[in-house]
Image (tube, rainbow, N blue to C red):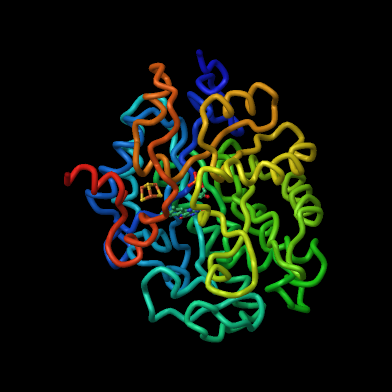
Amino acid sequence: MELKNLFSPGKIGNVQIKNRIIRSATWVAKATNEGYVTDDLINLFKDLADGGTGLIISGYLAVDPSGAATHKMACLYDDSYISRQKELVKTVHDFSEVKIAAQIAHTGNGAFIFGNTNFEPVGPSPMINRVLKKPCRELTTEEVRQIIKNFVDTGRRAYECGYDMVQIHGSHGYLLSDFVSPYTNKRTDEFGGSYQKRSKILVDIYNQLREEVDKNFPIIIKLNTKDYLQDGLTLDEAKEMAKILIETGYDAIEPSSGRYDLKFSKRKTFPSVMIKSGINQNYFLQNVLKLKPIMKGRPIILQGGVRDPLIMEDFLKDDIADFIALSRPLIYEPNLPNRWKTGDLTPPLCTNCNGCLTVAATDTLYCIVKNKLEEK
Ligand SMILES: Cc1cc2nc3c(=O)[nH]c(=O)nc-3n(C[C@H](O)[C@H](O)[C@H](O)COP(=O)(O)O)c2cc1C
Ligand code: SF4
């Protein structure tokens, strides 16, 4: 069967993407300890570009030294990072028609989760970082404004590096998603309270970044859309927030959900990458269905355990989603899109074991299942 929709071109803003397959942002622990691009990192992007993915979203890039808590996380918070980032972007662009987005982030209260232990967890309100049971310090209003500026400066640098678009990381319990969530944001200044105020940080980042880059440079967002907590963000509220973001001008939304840190607590949540079996495929489908009507024609990206190419084809054909994003399957098989395109439609070899996430925390990212097979 031909995957006509999956391999037809699509657009985000004015950027043409050769097919509907996106590599969802994936931190790979391959930067230097100081966050500079390495040859190893460039080679990984080369393999992805060669493997047929239409749009590759980078792993999260830190917008500020205080938001670079993850082990060997690449950074872009000052100009010294630009030249090697440019080389990485050029490597991808050498493959005709492959596009690349920079995901920019601040790890916030997510400090300590994957590696570096000398970072202070910060967030919208005081809370406990559940992984190391450390307190998280509330940012002052002035500090919030400075972090917005850092997102803007980093987004502008990504533009200067030649990235085709930028993705704001508003998910998974890192800083921006903590502002979005009523579970973590108890502020009483302009950045807390109603959902409108909790979205303000995202609105300000968009508006200020838009001033710094070409009007045709897409600014997209990966957005937490549900906390799966009694007093957390609901899908209804996330829909209202998404409406604000689309009205503001965001060019696409990739719904996500959950918090990494609650994986380690008794409270039940739904961290986006912790699904371990293929049974729970397409686990953010409800989130996409909820947001789709407010998108005003801008693309919505489905990610989260999306595995079966025939089902992907149906999602696209039925206009449920505009793009499909994958993370773990492309770790095991960077050539997966080409494999599907040439007619081998068997599902990804990735077993969803999350072993790659564990090894990346202390070493560098690789697929443990594939490695074991190759060793045999
Ligand atoms: C090793 C690893 C690193 C990840 N790093 C990021 C990241 O930097 N930014 C992000 O938004 N999501 C990150 N994610 C989440 C993925 O982008 C994706 O949302 C999630 O894995 C679900 O997609 P999948 O089922 O196709 O893997 C990461 C996931 C894994 C497994
Ligand atoms: S380690 Fe497990 S989850 Fe990660 S890519 Fe390999 S099979 Fe998939």
Q: Is residue 27 visible?
A: yes
Q: In this view, does 356 lie above or below 13?
A: below
Pick the front one: 271 or 248: 271
Pick the front one: 234 or 71: 234
Q: Residue 200 at what x, y percent from top left? A: 73, 62
Residue lying at 79% horizontally and 37% vertically, measured from the top left? 293
Residue lying at 50% horizontally and 25% vertically, measured from the top left? 19
Side of 94 relative to 174 (left or right):
left
Pick the front one: 156 or 137: 137
Q: Is residue 87 visible?
A: no
Pick the front one: 352 or 156: 352
Q: In which quarter of the image is the C terminus?
A: top left
Residue lying at 38% horizontally and 37% vertically, measured from the top left? 349
Residue lying at 42% horizontally and 55% vertically, measured from the top left? 354
Q: Residue 57 at what x, y percent from top left? A: 46, 44
Residue placed furthest toward the left = 376
Name the quadrant containing residue 249. top right
Q: Residue 317 at what x, y percent from top left? A: 65, 21
Q: Is residue 198 above or below residue 243?
A: below
